[in-house]
Structures are given as C-alpha cells and as structure tokens.
Image (tube, coloured by chain):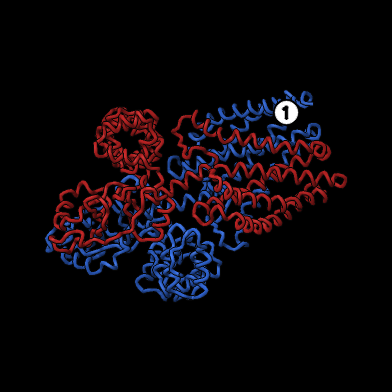
Chain colours: A blue, B red
Amino acid sequence: MATEIPNESIDATGELEALIQSRNGEAIVAFMRLLPPEDTAYTLSHLSDESRTDLFKQLSDAAPELGADLLEHFVDEYTADLIGELEPGQAAALVDEMDSDEQADVLSELDEDEAEAILQEMDPEEAEDARERMGYDEDVAGGLMITEYLVYNQGQTVEEVTRDLHEKAEEHIEFEVRYIYVVDDADRLTGVVPMRSLVFVPGSRRVEEQQIPEPLTVNVHTSLDDLHDLFDRVDLSAVPVIDDHGKLAGVVQRASVQEAIGDRESEQFLRFGGIIGGEELRSMSIGSRAARRLAFLLPIMLLLLASATVIALFEDTVKKLPILAAFLPVVAGICGSGGNQAVAVSIRELSLGLIDSSDFVRVLVKELVVALMIGLVLGVVMFVIVFAWQRNVHLALVLGGAIPFVVTVSKTIGGTVPVLLKKTGIDPAMASGPIVTTVVDLVGFFTVLMLATQMLDKLL
Amino acid sequence: MATEIPNESIDATGELEALIQSRNGEAIVAFMRLLPPEDTAYTLSHLSDESRTDLFKQLSDAAPELGADLLEHFVDEYTADLIGELEPGQAAALVDEMDSDEQADVLSELDEDEAEAILQEMDPEEAEDARERMGYDEDVAGGLMITEYLVYNQGQTVEEVTRDLHEKAEEHIEFEVRYIYVVDDADRLTGVVPMRSLVFVPGSRRVEEQQIPEPLTVNVHTSLDDLHDLFDRVDLSAVPVIDDHGKLAGVVQRASVQEAIGDRESEQFLRFGGIIGGEELRSMSIGSRAARRLAFLLPIMLLLLASATVIALFEDTVKKLPILAAFLPVVAGICGSGGNQAVAVSIRELSLGLIDSSDFVRVLVKELVVALMIGLVLGVVMFVIVFAWQRNVHLALVLGGAIPFVVTVSKTIGGTVPVLLKKTGIDPAMASGPIVTTVVDLVGFFTVLMLATQMLDKLL
C-alpha cells in the first residue's frame, strides 16, 4: 500500500505524514520516488513543520541523495533552517550529496558554529570545496560554479584519460561532461577538449594535442549579469572559472546562470510587492513574517501621514466643499498606479541592462510623452464622469484638468526614481514604490486642492 | 579604428551608428565581436530604430549567425517586429541561424503571410522543423525543445556512429551532445547512450547494446511547470520529448526550462506592476505603449471612482470634521500596500506550486494571524501620531481602532483573491492588484467614516 503510485484521488500529504510517523524509511523512499515531480513541492509544503524535519532526519540515513534533491525545492534560508535542526552528522550526510553550488549557499545561511560542526562531519574533500566557495557571493562566478568537472594534466595521454573516464563513470554522473579541462602542473588551464573529439583519436596522443587552446574563461568574481550576457552571446553550455591565482577553480554552467537569473527576478517581484528579505514561504514563522512585512508598512504609513498634512492645510476648502474628500483618494490612486507602471518598466530595463544610471534624461523624455497622452485621455474621462455625477462643470474642470498634470508628474517621477536610486546603490525594486507613492500623493493633493481653493467661488 | 576594442570611454553606440551608416559590413562584424557581451544589450537598445533595422539588414548578408545571436537579446515580439521590416530573404538568413526553439517563437509573432514568405526562403529542413513547432505553445515541451540532437538507428554500430560524429563535428557544435538518442525503424526512442560510454567500446558493437533502455521522457504537451519540477528532481541536463505518435520529436534542455521560468517570472513582475502584454521595451512605439498602459489605468480609475462614492455618502460627516479628508488616503494607502504584500506572496506561491486553488482556507488562516499582529502595531502607532498631531483622543481612537480591522481585512482579501482568481482562470498577477485595492479602499473608507459618524458628538 505504501508504495502505491499517489494520484489525484489520494491525499499524498496525509499518506506521507503517516509513513513518517511509522518511521518506515524504505517505504518513505519508495513513496517519494513514485510521487510525480510536479506534486513534490506541494506535498512537502503541506507537511507539518515537525513531520518535515522528521522526514529529512529519516532520509539522511535511508537515502541522503534523495533528501538532497528534495532540499533543492526550498529556498536556501529555509533549507538552512531545516538542516540546522538535524544532528551535524545527519546534516552532513545530506549536504555531502548536494550540488557543490548549493552546499556553500546553504552553509553560509547557518551560524558559523553550526556550519563548522557540519563541515567537520562532511567528506573532507567536499568540505574543503565548500569552505573555499563560502568565500564567494552567491551571484558571482565563484558562487555559481560547480566543482564537479573533468580535469586532466596536459601531459596525460588520451588512453589514460579514457580509461579514467571509464573507471569513474559512476562518479561522473552529475558532472559537466561536455568538455575535459586540461591544466598544466601549476593547475593553470591550458585548454579544453570537447568530449566527442576523444572518440576517434589514437590513445597514445597527449591530451594537449587535442585541446582547443586559450578557451573562453571567466574570473571567480565575474558577476551574474555579465555571465548572463556572456551566455546570450556564445553557444556554450559551460565556461571554466579561473581564480585570482590563475588556477582553474570550477565550471559555471549555462543552466546555473539561468536559474540564478530566474531566482533574482522572482525575488525582485516580492520586493516590489513589499516583501523584505527576498523570499517568504508560508512555512516561515508567523512572528518573523509579521516583522518583515511591518518593516515595509510602517515607513509607508509614516510617509502617507506626511503627505496627508497637505490636505490638512486646506481644511477650510474641504469644509466648504466636502465632496472633494471623495476625489482625493481617486487622484492618489491613479497617480500611484500610473507611477508604479513606470517604476516597473524602469526596474525591468535596469535589470536587463537596457538602461543604466546615466540614462536619466532619456527615461524622462520617453515617459513624458507617454504620460501626456495617457493623462489627456484619463482627464477627459474624469471630466465626463464628474460632470455626469455632480452636475458641476467647474468641479469637473478642476478634476479633469488636474489629471493630465498629475499623471505626467507621476509617470516621470516613477520612471526616473529607480534610475536615480540605482545611482545611489539603494535597491530600486524595494524603495521606488513607497517613494514614488508619497511624492505623487503630495503633488496630486496639492494640485487638486490648490485649484479648488482658487476657484472656490465658482465651485459652490 | 573601426575594430578597436570599445571601452568605457568610447561611445559604443555612436561608433556603431557611424559604422552602420558607412555600410561597412566587415567593420560592423568586427566591432560587434569585440564589444564586451555585457555592453551588447545596452548598445543595441540605444541605437535609433532605423539604425537597428539597418544593422540587421547588413548582418543578414555579412554574418547571419552573429545577427541571430544578437536577436536573442530582444523579446520575441520585438524580434518579430524587426524581422518583419527586412526582405523575406534577409529575414530567412537570420532565422535559419537561430536556435530551433527561438525560430518558432518569433515566426508565430508575425502575420501568417509574412511568416510564410520567410519560411519559403528558409533552408527547407529548418522550415519544416519550424512549421511543426509553430503548432505548440511556447510553454510546453514541444515549444521549448531543440531539434538539434544526435540520433542514430539502433542497428548502427558504434564505429558508424563515432565516424559520423567525427565527420559532422562542425555541424554539431550547437547540439545537445551529452547523449546519443537511439531510435528504431519507426523513429520510436529505444534508449539513450551517454556520450562518454562510447569512448571505450569496440567499434563493432551495435549502439543498442550500449543504450540505457526506457529512458525518462516527456510528451510534447508537458507543461513548463512540470518540466521545472522534473529537472528539480532529476540530475539530467536534457530529456527527450516524444510526440503523440510515440516518435522522438526533440530534446528539452535544463537551461531552456530555467530560461523560460525566468522569463515568466519577469513578465509576471511587469503584469503585477500594471504593464499589460507582458514585456515593454522603450523601443516600442509611444502610441502602443500609451494604449497598453491605459488599458490598465482606465479600469482602475473607474474602480477608484466607484469606491469614492462611499465617501460621498458621508459628505455631512466630512463637512463637520474636514480633517477626516486627510486621513482617508492614509487608510487607503496602508490597506493597499498591506493587501499587495499578501497578493505578492500568494502569486509567488501559486507559481512555485506550493499552494493551489483549493488552498483558500489555508491561506486565509495564515494571513489572518499575521494581519492581526501587523494591524495591532500599526493601530497603536496611528493612535499615538493622530493624538500628538490633532490632540483629539476620540479621533485617535477612531483611526487607531479602525487600522487593525481594515489591515486584517486587506491582508486576508489580498492573500485569497489570487487563489480565487486562479480558480476562475483569470491571471492573478494582473487582476489581483486592482481588485484588492478597490475592495480594501471601500472597506477602509466605510469603516473610518461609519465610526466617525457614530462618534461625531465626541469628535467635535
């Protein structure tokens, strides 16, 4: 029963919870292997926190490589949390089986002591590797590279290489195996040999005779953006990474770069939505989720209160014409949405490298024209609606006339604030929204109330 | 001069414009090859529209493969626009050199006539391929797969295969070459042979003796999400794709899946920001950009006006206590931002497959607890500020007391609307924001004004 293929009609989460409680390691492994890949994330995320920890404890004994694969379904912070609850030996068994680029990411999220305890229990070679990689950021070549690759000395013969390949075939299963990397006695890369070019050569040849010399390389500090652009330009599946001493340090694969770009896009999405700290899974504790959201909302509330002071200045006007109170949030809402569209486009183009922080005027001009067109259309619609509703042509003129101006201001501010923030080094995805909203609210309130005050006689 | 390496101090765009005008194909090719990959997108996006078209006209003669690589820097819609301005012969030269998964994407964006004219001029094999692939969505295996892979009949010998590999090495340079795919006489996949396992076997053996039988496969209709989950689970760089007749149709690579996921994330980001139609580059015409943005803003304005009618109902209250007009946009702003945080988290979890449309209650409960905690903190801060500013304890109580309630409503609505929209098939990233904003504005205005009206005697 336990190893039946789970299907739609079975409660996979309930089934798995039961297996975990019964501590039947083999049945758990069989169940997880039969679970359709598309249901894995869902099932894991619906386990209780205790069961989830228990699952990985049991997998670290029964099938650490499966456990390591499953851990890749979580973000690094969560994996680190989970790993931190296991015994160092159990944790090490799982971490040993992770891809080398994941190991460092996860260990870096732990306390130094916890990480050290796990490193001590790990396979010494894997541990040394992980230590070295923990020195690099996640989004440079050193943090993205894998260290499982095929490397041979330039003096070795093709026969030696092919025999070694054959003997270690099992071990190489997760290697980047399109190329063989050739180094000299000081571990400096001298060339690469495409795997297929070994198929048809006399075994007595030295690998260096087969190599493509001076291959394209990157440095351990090459940024994710530069790597992304590089893989856009060249049709390679992987590029060797050289450290500061000129030695071959690893191989960065196209797929790893694409994955990191995807992760960054989705973190940007959350920050733009006001979720600080990148990722937030529902498995995170309620308290820390509330704290992270508050860190964004509290400053916003203060900014909103600041822009509200403008309205307070015109209390008399509002007293005489209270219907204005109904239109102020509409003006603020339009300005906010219009400004945010421009923010989204600019952030997107900054992250694609289509504009940079020097493009202030260029963005301003382009936004200006679009904003005027949009503003005029919205202004006319506003005029018609206000007139139809309130039968007050002057009020319709004040609101319809304010809209093109405030929309234009919002869009130009929205488009340029991310560019300016980029210059100062503040994260545009996070900070642009609140700044733009506050500024455009101020402009919108002031414009409408000032116009109304000037025309108050006609409005009443 | 023309082939100097462009660096920071040189105006690469200006330089390139000049080369394009001088119609010096060779110099353009040399310049583009020397341009650092990280500057390519920026330089291309800063050319004038005419120069950009002209560049690709010249590249289609001088270096179509370089032109095809450069076209990958644009989104499909823009590439299609650009291709559409070339002669069919020129366009075909570029499309011939594109990756097979890109060809269909771009051709599908063109008018049928234009696409047909280009297909006629293309290499017949490439054209047939492209036609077949145009029948698949971009985000299923059939649309993501490449058709450049190594395929041999099960009856062939290892020697035949290795000789063929050697002879066609040049042609295979952009192939997925980790595996050889083995088919029977009816083109049905019988197994895969890892390239390295050919290195050390007698040439007289038949490839089928070397193959791993019953390899993991996907169907042409397998969705992007399922492919993503699959590659999370298995350590393969590529998986063969089978069509509805059981024949091998292509190979879907891990990198293509990661790239498609990244593209989808970033489109979701734009839709969340209110940019309809996915992508928007500054090279798009002003008119169509304005129209797309209006398509989002106009409904929002109407929704905002609708929620403003609530305020109009309480005109008398506002007349007596006009300072309320200053606080209404603050309440709306807090509710909007708080609701949008919950929207962002739910959209993210829907797209990661961590929750699905049946998780309504689960999301509701989790949001409820977080929202209450946040609401209480914000309410206390609001009370303190309002009291300090207006010295009116009753007004401070009305506003400070309303906040926990309206924040809780906003967050639960924000968290659950994307889940409900997913159920109806409407795009949550696009529609959630406006719906949530309107509803929470209504709730916020009504709550504050109702409380104020009830307590009006004490407030004055």
Q: Residue furthest right?
A: B457
Residue at 67% across / 38% down in the picture? Answer: A442
The answer to whether residue A117 shows anywhere in this view is no
Residue at the spot 51% in from the left edge and 69% down from the top edge: A111
Q: Position of residue A89 (x, y in %)?
A: 44, 76
Q: Residue at x 57, y 42 (%)?
A: B431
The 10 Å Cα crowd at callout 1, few under 14, some 14 to 19, many 20 or more, is few
Identify which residue is drawn at 29% across, 62% down.
A149
Q: Chain of mark 1?
A: A
Secondary-structure class at tag 1: helix
- Is residue B147 or residue A398 the one in the foreground? B147
Name the quadrant of the N terminus of chain B: top left
Measuring from the top left, give residue B352's x and y in whole percent.
49, 54
Rendered location of residue A239, percent (x, y): 31, 54
The residue labelled by disc 1 is A389
Which image quadrant: the C terminus of chain B?
top right
Q: Nearer the viewer, residue B127 or A280?
A: B127
Residue type at the position of mark 1: Trp
For residue B202, side relative to residue B366 (left or right): left
Give above or below for A283 relative to A364. Answer: below
Quarter of the view holding residue A128: bottom left
Horizontal and vertical percent position of residue B321: 82, 40
Residue in front for this viewpoint, A220 or A292: A292
Q: Is A432 in front, or is B283? A: B283
Vertical order, A219 against A370 (above or below):
below
